[in-house]
């Protein structure tokens, strides 16, 4: 490639990090320190079109019923067990399960018996502040 072609491609990059990402989840989770309760969450990739977080809902955690007004959320369960509220019903989830939740749909996640490890992918990117609308 010519210098000009490389500069054109570089001009397309608007992500953080600004390089391709390869993450070994087993190693990632093994090195992560978890809080005593709640959700451990780290943004590992973001751009104006999407955002990806690696998360753990610690045993005993219920996130709380909520919905998003701007973003669709994709939850990919990669370890542990828990439950996700899907269309008003709690459904058991384990590694290999995928939950697709369009904006405006109420959902919740809980890890009652063991930690639940998952990826959350938001599209478009979560707006500044938050896109979480909590329900009681």
Image (cartoon, rainbow, N blue to C red):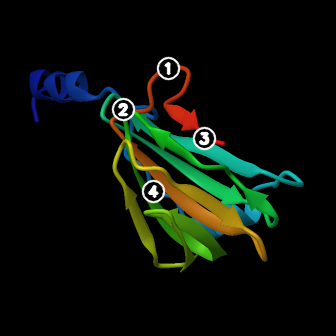
At x 54%, y 64%, the residue is: 85
- The mark found on residue 55 in the picture is none
Mark with earlier residue (1, 4): 4
Residue pointed to by mark 1: 128
Element under disc 4: loop
Which of the two residues, 8 or 59, is positioned nearer the viewer here?
59
Mark with earlier residue (3, 2): 2
- The mark found on residue 22 in the picture is 4
Disc 4 versus disc 2: nearer the observer: 2
Dots 2, 1 in contact, CB < 8 A: no
Q: CA distance from mark 3 to mark 2?
A: 16 Å
Q: CA distance from mark 3 to mark 4?
A: 36 Å
Disc 1 versus disc 3: nearer the observer: 3
Could you say where residue 68 lies in the image, as x and y percent from the top left? Answer: 44, 38
Q: CA distance from mark 1 to mark 4?
A: 26 Å
Q: CA distance from mark 2 to mark 1?
A: 11 Å
At x 72%, y 50%, the residue is: 40
Please say if 114 is above or below 9: below
- The mark found on residue 70 in the picture is 2
The answer to which image quadrant residue 26 occupies is: bottom right
Would residue 31 be found to the left or right of residue 67 on screen? right
Element under disc 1: loop
Mark with earlier residue (3, 4): 4
Could you say where residue 43 lies in the image, as x and y percent from the top left? Answer: 56, 41
- The mark found on residue 135 in the picture is 3
Dots 1, 3 in contact, CB < 8 A: no
The answer to which image quadrant residue 103 occupies is: top left
Mark with earlier residue (4, 2): 4
Mark with earlier residue (2, 1): 2
Q: CA distance from mark 4 to mark 2?
A: 28 Å
Q: CA distance from mark 1 to mark 3?
A: 20 Å
């Amino acid at each position: 490639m010519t210098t000009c072609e490389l500069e054109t491609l570089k001009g397309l990059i608007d992500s953080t990090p600004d390089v391709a990402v390869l993450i070994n989840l087993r190693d990632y989770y093994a090195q992560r320190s978890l809080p005593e309760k709640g959700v451990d969450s780290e943004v590992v990739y973001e751009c104006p079109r999407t955002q990806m977080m690696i998360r753990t809902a610690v045993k005993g955690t219920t996130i709380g019923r909520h919905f998003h007004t701007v973003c669709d959320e994709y939850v990919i369960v990669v370890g542990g067990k828990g439950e996700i509220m899907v269309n008003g019903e709690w459904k058991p989830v384990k590694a290999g399960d995928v939950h697709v939740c369009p904006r405006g749909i109420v959902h919740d996640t809980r890890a009652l018996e063991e930690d639940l490890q998952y990826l959350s992918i938001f599209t478009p990117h979560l707006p500044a502040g938050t896109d979480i609308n909590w329900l009681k």
